[in-house]
Image (spheres, rainbow, N blue to C red):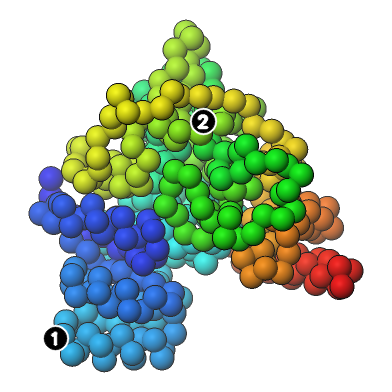
Amino acid sequence: MKQQNISILGATGSIGTSTLDVISLNRDKFRVFAITANSQIDKLFLQCIEFNPYYAVVANESDANRLHDMLRTKEVDTEVLYGAESLAYVASHQNVDMVMAAIVGAAGLLPTLDAARAGKKILLANKETLVVAGDLFMRTVRQSGASVLPVDSEHNAIFQSLPEKVRLAMANGKWKTEDYQSSGISSIILTASGGPFLDTDIDIFANITPQMALKHPNWSMGRKISIDSATMMNKGLEVIEACHLFNIPADLIEVVIHPQSIIHSMVRYIDGSVLAQMGTPNMCTPIAYCLGLPERIDAGVEALDFFTTDALCFRAPDIERFPCLQLAFEALRLGKDAPCILNAANEIAVANFLDDKIRFTDIARVIEKTMSLCPLNDDIFSIEQLLQKDTIARDMAQQIITDMIKNDE
């Protein structure tokens, strides 16, 4: 395998650090070209020392100057850049072979789109790219000849469980919806852990604190995605992602609660077979799969021990307990830019919940009200239109929260 140059967008987050962990085990195969971070400058500094990338990108000039000075004390010659243009630069640079798109939230959309325009191999861990701009992004991928490999454990599991010809077609942007029947696929099944409140009395949901919601039983994740897991909005976003990523209609997607997080997702075939991808709950596995494809490489992950694994259980999701999942299906039904509105409202609601400004149960209420009040746009031709709608929906969601707080006083 020829050594590949990789830019890691969001290097200090959980996906970014896991990516660097896998690369550290396979240094002969990968060279870190660039790493980026928003505000964790000290952590980025340590990553620069260990991996000596050509570029490090931060959000603003003051942090760039600080990082530059820190690196010079260690005689590390990494060039420090800052701002959105620099993110685009390292995502689309001619010497970059692949891009790990792991910036959390809508902020990761633009540099990921830049990588797609440049025809890069994109390891996609940013949900919002497909949720907010799925049609536009996948159209760009097909036009440029870029390839997209799913890093999310569920989508990666589905990808691994598809027939080889389908994986190859997907990787080359040539997969069509009508090809499903000829491939024997009847549906795809997204598994969900159910998060920390799967069996919690629903009557006390209004009293759930951010500290409680951040304690996921199986996965170690960032703050925002941990809350999304607790509300099951993460699964709703994954349904929207799957529609675009696999070019499949929503009615061919099933969601199943699987608390043990051992089976990461499945594909159902017309002959009655169900193929599943299993493994220890560790994001290094799907990251290593995407990095190494078509080879399998060392992920540093502990092998699944079948003799100490609990019995595997499955159940249907409870919409009363997890209304955010239903809201995501509703956004798909509405189409147009409804998923963009859904995502924007969710980000604002989650941020306010983490700041103890609204209750856990208010998250779904804020999203639902924003979706009901925010007008839909029939024609989406550009990323600027989507970003404008994103801003409108965020402002609307924040105003809804402000009104809620006033009414509670």
Labelled disc at residue 357: none
Question: In this image, 333 relative to 62: left or right?
Answer: right
Which quarter shows the N terminus? top left
Q: Position of residue 33 (x, y in %)?
A: 23, 67
Label 1 vs 2, first from the N-terminus:
1
In the image, is residue 60 above or below residue 52?
below
Task: Kindly indicate whether the residue at mark 2 contacts the one at mark 1 (C-beta within 8 angstroms).
Answer: no
The residue pinned by badge 2 equals 258
Quarter assignment of residue 187: top right
The residue positioned 29% from the left and 55% from the top of the image is 19
Mark in the foreground, 1 or 2:
2
Which quarter shows the C terminus? bottom right
> Can the viewer see residue 323?
yes
> Can the viewer see residue 90?
no
The residue positioned 21% from the left and 60% from the top of the image is 5
Q: Position of residue 194 (x, y in %)?
A: 57, 39
Q: Residues within 10 Å of mark 1 (few under 14, many from 20)?
A: few
Decide which of 278, 337 is in the foreground and name it.
278
Quarter assignment of residue 98: bottom left
